[in-house]
């Protein structure tokens, strides 16, 4: 099973379209770690901030989407998305792995993430919020933040997302598809 992983799209219809059309349309499932539509008062406005268009694209997705609610996701956003987004956490069991999906604003420190992952016996713990991609294995858990395709806070400014299959997880550049970091699941 191939999974697309994204977070912090913040209403960027263009970034979603690039990720979906070039990578996610070929997946079996998409995880979105929150902050889907609203750009938030602390974020700069993107050139392609078109939340209504992004909501329509998400509704039309032929690939199932599992999403967690982020700190910028409002009740109005949830009403127009057409996918469940009410909880700050989502759980899935995929390819024999327990996956926890959360935005990350409720578990910001590494200690909080480690504690939650241990309580939930997570094999993979996906979060967003920081807009900085990270992939690391701590103990028996892989911690993944796919970064942001719309409002990257990487030093080099590269827009990112992640892909996962039975063998690997990789963080990729949105524009080139280049693998920036990754881990083996075997």
Image (spheres, rainbow, N blue to C red):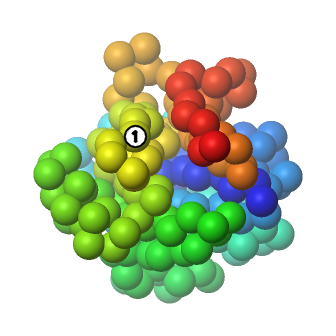
- Quadrant housing residue 87: bottom left
Q: Residue at x 31, y 63 (%)?
A: 117
What residue is shown at x 66% (from left), y 48% (from top)? 164
Q: Is residue 107 above or below residue 67?
A: above
Instruction: Classify 77 as above or below 97.
Output: below
Residue 90 spot, x, y in % from top left: 45, 75
Point out the image quarter for the C terminus.
top right
Seen at 48% across and 52% down, the residue is 7
Residue 95's x, y, as percent?
A: 68, 64
Q: Nearer the viewer, residue 68 or 139?
A: 139
Instruction: Report the residue marked by disc 1.
Output: 137
Q: Secondary structure at mark 1?
A: strand
Where is residue 177 shown, x and y percent of the image? 71, 27
Q: Residue at x 41, y 57 (%)?
A: 125
Question: Can you see residue 163?
Answer: no
106 horizontally vs 47: left or right: left
- Residue sitting at the far top: 156
């Amino acid at each position: 099973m191939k999974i697309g992983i994204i977070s912090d799209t913040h209403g960027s219809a263009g970034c979603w379209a690039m990720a979906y059309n070039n990578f996610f349309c070929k997946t079996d499932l998409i995880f979105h770690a929150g902050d889907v539509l609203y750009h938030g008062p602390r974020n700069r406005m993107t050139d392609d901030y078109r939340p209504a268009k992004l909501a329509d694209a998400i509704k039309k997705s032929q690939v199932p989407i599992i999403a967690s609610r982020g700190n910028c996701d409002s009740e109005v956003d949830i009403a127009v998305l057409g996918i469940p987004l009410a909880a700050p956490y989502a759980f899935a069991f995929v390819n024999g792995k327990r996956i926890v999906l959360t935005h990350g604003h409720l578990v910001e420190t590494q200690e909080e993430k480690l504690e939650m992952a241990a309580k939930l016996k997570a094999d993979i713990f996906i979060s967003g919020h920081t807009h900085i991609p990270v992939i690391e294995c701590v103990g028996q858990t892989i911690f993944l933040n796919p970064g942001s395709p719309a409002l990257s806070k990487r030093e080099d400014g590269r827009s990112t997302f992640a892909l996962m299959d039975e063998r690997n997880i990789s963080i990729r550049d949105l524009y080139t598809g280049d693998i920036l970091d990754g881990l083996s699941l075997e």
